[in-house]
Amino acid sequence: MRVLASGRGGDSTFELVPPRALDGARFWAELPGRIARELVRFRPDAVLAQSAYEAAAALAARRLVGRRTPVLVDVHGDWRTSTRLYGSPLRRALSPAADRLALGALRRADAVRTVSDYTTGLAREIGIEPADVFPAFMDLDPFLTEPRPLPERQAALFVGVLELYKNVDGLADAWRLAAPRAPEARLRIVGRGSRADVVERLVAELPDQTAWTPALPTDEVARAMDEATLVVLPSRSEGMGRVVVEALLRGRPVVGSRVGGIRDLVRDGENGLLVEPGDVGALADALVRALTDCELAERLAAAARPSAEPWLATPEEYAERLHALVTRAAGTPRLDES
């Protein structure tokens, strides 16, 4: 296997493209050429693309070199959010072209793999039946130890990028409403991104009840969950929601939006609380309920760990499923790229 990604360094398995000026734009512009070189040099049985955009680059690459190498694409979430709910608002101008590119790649790919009921629904909406459905492999070792009891002090934890799609602005507004009603509780935010100014203002307004940590290593994220009563994920859009799986494994209920993959993982009133996306008042109410009603919090926490078990897979199990998918795709290469 060979992996192409943006980063530093590389070895016989990973080719990491070092950051440079205009890194994002250059990476994407050069990606078809890089994949084309790998198709000739490495001669893979298939190309596994992590999104519709990587799939588009792979399809262009195989056309460049005249190969029939199958392209398999994962659908981890709604591909339309990348230009609408992430990064600079200027990215929205790219939405029409990006949507056409992604849709074309999904329809021309040799196989599509989805990771949940939600992403399967997205594929079927555009007339594609997934070749297989199974979650992405997640290295969850730091979260697999026996969950600890809920802490004595009420605390909510958010872990994620500070971007529009995570609705960190809605979380800030909800916490302004919730904090006075739960005066002993604290909110800890872990993450960095283009909406960091929203968090900075919140911490300045409620310094005794709000803390912000830009980044934490994985084992410390697990520790932060142990110190929390709940994990909050108020996203406007969400795919698999790895942080939800991590929270449930640590025995922590999740207060989240009723969107995307969150609905696949969180059962309202059983292992967490769900609210309508963008409803600041409902989010504040849910936070107050889960933070101040000890009986409710304990009941939700007790159901959290068992509800995460179906989403776990060993590396061997994941590799076996992936190998079977690649074998099927490579055995019947697509001849028509139109």
Image: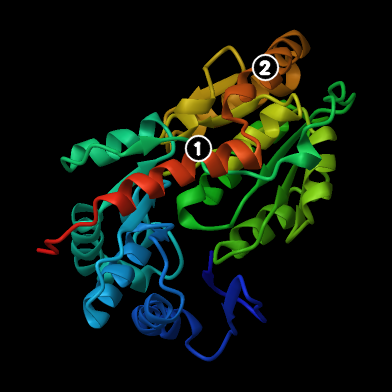
Circle nearer the N terminus (1, 2)? 1
Q: Which mark is residue 306?
A: 2
Query: Secondary structure under badge 1?
Result: loop
Residue 239 appearing in the image: no
Left or right: 173 as drawn, with respect to 149: left
Is 202 located above or below residue 88 in the figure? above
Residue at left 52%, top 91%?
Answer: 21
Which residue occupies the foreground of this view, 82 or 17? 17
Quarter of the image with the N terminus in it: bottom right
How packed is label 1: few (under 14 Cα within 10 Å), some, or many (20 or more)? some
Q: How many numbered marks appear?
A: 2
Q: Which residue is at the far front?
A: 331
Q: Which residue is located at x 30 percent, y 50 percent?
A: 331
In the foreground, 16 or 63:
63
Q: Which mark is residue 210?
A: none
**Residue 267: image x %, image y %?**
52, 18
Image coordinates for residue 188, horizontal then vertical, percent:
75, 45
User: From mark 1 to mark 2, how far is it between C-alphas?
Assistant: 17 Å
Mark 1 or mark 2, whichever is nearer to me: 1
- Residue 80: image location, x then y, percent: 31, 54
Drawn side of residue 234 relative to residue 204, left or right: left
Q: Which residue is mark 1?
A: 135
Q: Secondary structure at mark 2?
A: helix
Horizontal side of 226 relative to 97 (left or right) equals right
Give the left or right position of residue 231, taking residue 324 as reference.
right
Q: Which amino acid type is marked by label 2?
A: Pro
The residue lying furthest to the bottom in this view is 21
Based on the displayed image, in which of its 4 quarters is residue 52 positioned?
A: bottom left
Query: What amino acid is at disc 1?
Result: Pro
- Where 66 sits versus 256, above or below? below
**Residue at point 85% right, 25% down?**
146
- Classify the position of the C terminus by image quarter: bottom left
